[in-house]
Image (spheres, rainbow, N blue to C red):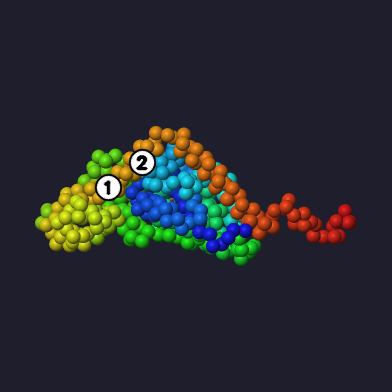
Amino acid sequence: MENKKEKIILTGDRPTGRLHVGHYVGSLKRRVELQNSGKFDEIYIMIADAQALTDNADNPEKVRQNIIEVALDYLSCGLDPAKSTLFIQSQIPELTELSFYYMNLVTVSRLQRNPTVKSEIQMRNFEASIPVGFFTYPISQASDITAFKATTVPVGEDQLPMLEQTKEIVRKFNATYADVLIEPEILLPDNKACLRLPGTDGKAKMSKSLGNCIYLADSEEDVKKKIMSMFTDPNHLRVEDPGKVEGNPVFIYLDAFSKQEHFEEYLPEYANLDELKAHYTRGGLGDVKVKKFLNAVMQEELSPIRAKRKEFEKDIPEIYNILKQGSEKAREKAAATLDDVKSAMKINYFEDKELIKTQSEKYRYEE
Ligand code: TRP
């Protein structure tokens, strides 16, 4: 049995595209900090290809090709295979097996009420044609988390309903069989602006299909172009007009990325973000000036990541090895948990003869 005081992280991303700055401030940056804090006994970072296939069944090519992109994003942000186990979900068949048993602990109506599933069904126009695999992905996510006995799951706010679902499954399992699963805690970003970074067009969510993302792998020029054409307050037409900072993506990005030092370095005429916001609100501050500042701030954060990516891109076979070794290690852990689960359910028949025996003496002798 595991020592329950161990602190274990599990988290991951669907490889449906390169990771963007929303992933970065929403979770990736935090993971690296947690990794380097030395406070965790084990850290698992999963590329959730099997989950990505639940709504990309007809496009395995896309999922496959993005595995390496996501791995490159991870490594260039500072996830270190010596400290964190990076692995590919589909290579851990134990996860599927766990899901099959957990499915018996969850009702259809409970899944229908899951807000993430609900909104994603709308977003993808699934309506009446939801694939069963997609519908049940909250259960598979519970398997991902519990297989590693994760205590801490650093993710974005959109994953909250998944964590709730996981906790319910854990409680139900432990109450029904035996106390073997760990209830995980979600770890959300402290900074509110990081909870959900809007798209560059001001839409609530960054999404590849909307073309409103700034990617970690974007070139310096691309980042600049995207920032300089960002949506701001549509009523802020002339510099002297008063502007709105609430809901204005440029200021939300500044909330997420800017630090005190950035003002001293790039915009010394303002003491801090509050002063900049106050000037914008009052009127007399142009969008271009604010955007140029944002560009400087974001380039400072993104350029080391970009440079590291270039290095890692030179040795793709090494990335392959990292993922292969990580997947082997992850599989051992998941297999140990699956053993615990099967023992708790008393379906580990071939480990204990007593588990399978006829229930009726009469039947046995009268035949
Ligand atoms: N659903 C997550 C996302 O879309 C990816 C994911 C799959 C995940 N399994 C997980 C995240 C387990 C945290 C824990 O980004």
Q: Which mark is residue 300?
A: 1
| Circle 1 residues within 10 Å: few <14, some 14–19, many ≥20 | few
Q: Position of residue 69 (x, y in %)?
A: 41, 40
Q: Residue beneath label 2, please?
A: 308
- Does the numbered disc 1 mark a residue whose Cβ is under 8 Å from ligand 1? no
Mark 2 and mark 1 residues within 8 Å of each other at the beta carbon: no
Q: Residue at x 37, y 54 (%)?
A: 26
Q: Between residues 352 and 42, which one lies in front from this camera angle?
A: 42
Which three-letter amino acid code belongs to the residue tagged 2?
A: Lys
**Judging from the image, what secondary structure is the residue with disc 1 in?**
helix
**Judging from the image, what secondary structure is the residue with disc 2 in?**
helix
Q: Between residues 22 and 106, which one lies in front from this camera angle?
A: 22
- How far separated are the C-alphas under marks 2 and 1? 14 Å
Q: Residue at x 85, y 60 (%)?
A: 361
* Viewport quadrant of the N terminus: bottom right
Which three-letter amino acid code belongs to the residue tagged 1?
A: Glu
Q: Position of residue 142 (x, y in %)?
A: 53, 55
Which of marks 1 and 2 precedes in the sequence? 1
Q: Residue at x 18, y 60 (%)?
A: 271
| Circle 2 residues within 10 Å: few <14, some 14–19, many ≥20 | some
Q: From the viewer's perspective, is residue 221 above or below residue 134? A: above
Q: From the viewer's perspective, is residue 20 above or below residue 340? A: above
Horizontal side of 162 relative to 209 (left or right) equals: right
